[in-house]
Image: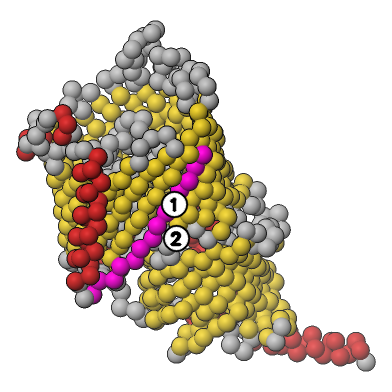
Amino acid sequence: MKIALVTSLLLISVTLLADITAEEVIEKMEQRQEFKSAFIQGRMVINDRFGEKISTFDSWSLGTDNSLIAFTSLEEQGQKVLRSDNDIYIYYPDAEELIRLSGSALRDGMLGSDVSYEDMTGEKSLLNDYRVTAFSQEPLGKHSTYKIELQALRSSVAYPKQILWIDIDTLNGIQAHKFSLSGKLIKVERVLEMITQGDHTFAIHSKVEDKLKSNSSTEFFIDHIEIDYPVTLDFFSLDELTW
Amino acid sequence: MNYYQNKRLPMTAATLVLLLLSHSPQADVTSNAELNFSNTLLLGSADPLYIADAISKLRLQSANNNKVKATLELGAKSSSYLEQEVSLDRAFIKTRTDRYRITLGKTRLSWGEGSAFNAGDVIMGGSDLNLQLTENDYRNSATWLTSFYRATGRFSFTELVIMPPEIQADLNESPTLDKAKVAARTQFRVDRLAKTKFELGYALKGTHHQPYISLQGGSGLNWHLSANLQADHSINASAGVYTLSNLGEQYTLSFRSELLYKSAGRSTEIPNGDNYRTYAYAYVEFGLSKGDGQSYYNRNIISPIDQSAMIILGTNINLHQGLNLFSHVSMQQGNSDDTFKQNLIGSYSLTLGSRFVF
């Protein structure tokens, strides 16, 4: 009887999974998070063994390739980060210094957080960098989720392996585990609160934990967001960066 | 200009900027202060010296105005050994239209490329050893200037700068127009050449012409190359590389190396020469940072001709919001007539301190 029940559940599960592929789930999740342009005011709360540090920022973005972040907190006031394609420009107002980074420097933790410049300034679709290696369903707290395992297509990708948990009903990403090449869990990302505006869904409170450091996490809060913000490509320039 | 004039100038400027900002209905002001305390032990040939320093900065900035910016920064330095100093470190106003920007006042511009050595910086200078290697910004001085800037593309612009003569009044010199400096540059990126950045410029002071070129690029390894022509037709050139890589899962290792070459210098050492000059310096830096706000560094300047060097080992810990604890050890290795000398007071030093921004 027990075997029959398990078999039935497995069959139902397989039938449900057959309706949609893992790639389609990822595409739909990304579509809900995509917008042409946006303006965001937010906070980054870094917790480490010494305590809590808060950085506030304004952020403008256009598509997935262009973003500008201006830090507004006292310590970093006026520091800006411009991402254009695969280049990152960092502006330090005190020294009037402009530094351009490329390659592996994009993976450096920004302001001592668990979030890299690459994480913070957006990236292209996951399917450009990863292939699906496993697809199943799994309950996660109160959510029924698709669990998708991804393997990096090339070594230049920041995390060689990722596991995603995506809500079946809303197709919102709920949790992600990111692994090193050796298979060690490096980061756990959790979405703690979401809002929906029109066809778009955003995480307004999320948490990134560095599993290699004890008591280390970075929380993101979005305090204000404007979708389809009127901004053109010309805005993402050295002129705006050094202003 | 005497001490009291020095002291009065920042106060007058502060009052003026505050009055200007307070009369503008749209301008808000943000402020922050930085306190930096350090205890330094100086060792060398004589008895050890112990000095305590306090450096403070007060910064006022206009906010919430997308067309006009103003910054006023006052600095004060006091120590247990030297007389206190008050300085006006920054005082400038910037305004912009669609593609044009004008900057007036005392500020800093960063021309060319390079952290320790930058032969492309014909404005502030980057071919000397006046470096603050234990600070975040190795070169942070400001100067009086008027700048006209025009954006010509997303990653290109031209800029014209006029600087009044910088002279010392107590030497009875007059700031005549012929001592003023005028400089211009254009910067652009060539996407077909791996997005290499080109910067071409020219500075004129009296009859001294100083053209320069600066290149920067990177794909994995970030590099830069700059050169300028001096008044005596000698060449200063600098080059450098910078890379960042993960070391294990918790650490980030940075490596920076820069070279400065001066064709006017001597290429051989002169024993016991009073004015010995080297023609090349090498700067090597290793940095190791841990994600929880701890960083460690080793910064070295090497003079290969006289085989002398300055070696600095330091650490910085971001303990709480705005609070950093730092320490560094500085050592100079070389003979008494070398670029770096080990037998003078201060040739070896140990510093412990803290910095708080609020």
Residue B32 covered by magenta stretch: yes
As measured in the structure, the alpha-carbon distance from the residue carrying label 1 to the one carrying label 2 is 9 Å
Q: Residue at x 52, y 79 (%)?
A: A204
Task: Specify whether B165 is left or right of A184.
Answer: left
Give the labeled residue for mark 2: B358
Residue B113 pos. (x, y %):
33, 42
Q: Residue at x 48, y 17 (%)?
A: B343
Quarter the C terminus of chain B occupies:
bottom left
* Closer to the camera in the image, A201 or B316: B316
Residue B11 in sight:
yes
Chain identity of mark 2:
B
CB contact under 8 Å: marks 1 and 2: yes
Judged by its main secondary structure, the magenta piece is: strand
Magenta part of the protein: which range? B26-39
Residue B326 covered by magenta stretch: no
Give the labeled residue for mark 1: B35
Q: Amino acid at mark 1?
A: Leu
Q: Secondary structure at mark 2?
A: loop
State the residue lying farthest toward the left: B177
Sequence-first disc among 1 and 2: 1
Residue B222 pos. (x, y %):
43, 44
Task: Specify whether B216 is left or right of A149.
Answer: left
Residue A40 pos. (x, y %):
42, 75
Circle on res. B297: none
Q: Residue at x 51, y 32 (%)?
A: B50
Q: Amino acid at mark 2?
A: Phe
Q: Secondary structure at mark 1?
A: strand
